Amino acid sequence: MQQQYHVLEIKPGQVGHVVVNSLPGLFNYLGEELPLYSPLHLDPQALDGHDLALILPLGQPECIQVFYRINEPDADVYVLDEHNSLWHQRLPYHDEQSLLTPLQRFLQSLVYRRGASLPLDDLSEPVSLETLYYQVLPSGPGLARRVEHRLAPTAADKAFYDVQAIIEETSPGQLSATLYCDNCDNCEFSELEYGDQLYAAVARQILVKRLEPQRYRCYITDLDLSGLLDDRHGQSILLLHHKAELEKLLNEAMDQA
């Protein structure tokens, strides 16, 4: 029997009803951009035992909240952004530091770029966003029971490769990416130069510079969308979606290299 989720959207002067026909569809719905912070009120019976049943009621304005749950060999990572939009990714798990540090670096860059782009007289948005970390427990495949606050990741004791991406619109509806690898002598790889071989070229360069023999994921740690956003700073969920798509293409290329 197909499970459905019913969402009541309460706006000034009107109430809307949205039917979502699957859990992946619910993730997509909750991951949409929002113009302002929108609180979520969950029916006590909805999503019973799922991670989201514990995560969604904890949403707060003016901050970014990172939740993770370990279920080796993977971990689920969730982010509630400053408008309460939800982002989710399932990643290979080795340890908490390697799981969280790349995301921490990305969010630090995001917050910095956001603060730099806000007009000084814009009081509708907070100048800075605090990032909070939580672990969903217990680990493993069982039902989620509780959420515990965690400190932000500490400085990494091993090298992480910072990969910066810039996405620009080269023509109406046509986007182009440029990647920079900080630990590869600041190499620049543009889609205009490499075409559909862009990610393969970046993957080869990263693998040449790595000292470890084993393969592991590469992460985007900085993303510049200023060329797409005009005078807007862009909601965090938008940057997280672009980050996930770039990482998918890059890691597929690394698997094939």
Image (cartoon, grey):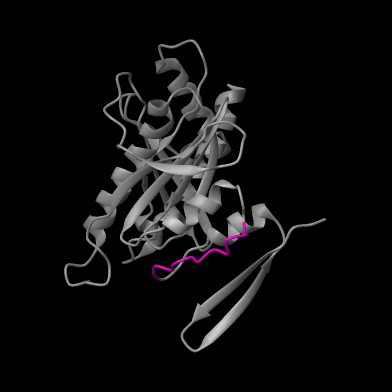
Asked if residue 135 lies left or right of residue 195, the reply is left
Residue at x 40%, y 17% (from the top left corner): 209
Residue 133, given in percent of the width and then of the height, sits at: 36, 42
Q: Quadrant of the C terminus?
A: top right
Give the answer, above or below, for where 193 lies relative to 63.
above
Residue toward you, 20 or 252: 20
Residue at x 26%, y 27% (from the top left corner): 155
Residue extending farthest to the left is 120
Residue toward you, 243 or 19: 19
Residue toward you, 146 or 227: 146
Confirm whether the magenta stretch covers residue 42: yes
Residue at x 33%, y 18% (from the top left corner): 158
Residue 120, given in percent of the width and then of the height, sits at: 17, 67
Give the answer, above or below, for where 171 lies relative to 70.
below
Residue toward you, 16 or 50: 50
Q: Which residues are magenta?
A: 36-46
Residue extending farthest to the bottom is 13
Specify whether residue 191 is in view.
yes
Image-quadrant location for residue 152: top left
Q: Quadrant of the N terminus?
A: bottom right
Residue 191, given in percent of the width and then of the height, sits at: 48, 41
Specify whether residue 180 is in view.
no
Total number of numbered labels?
Answer: 0
Confirm whether the magenta stretch covers residue 88: no
Residue 27, given in percent of the width and then of the height, sits at: 59, 55
Image-quadrant location for residue 161: top left
Residue at x 27%, y 72% (from the top left corner): 124
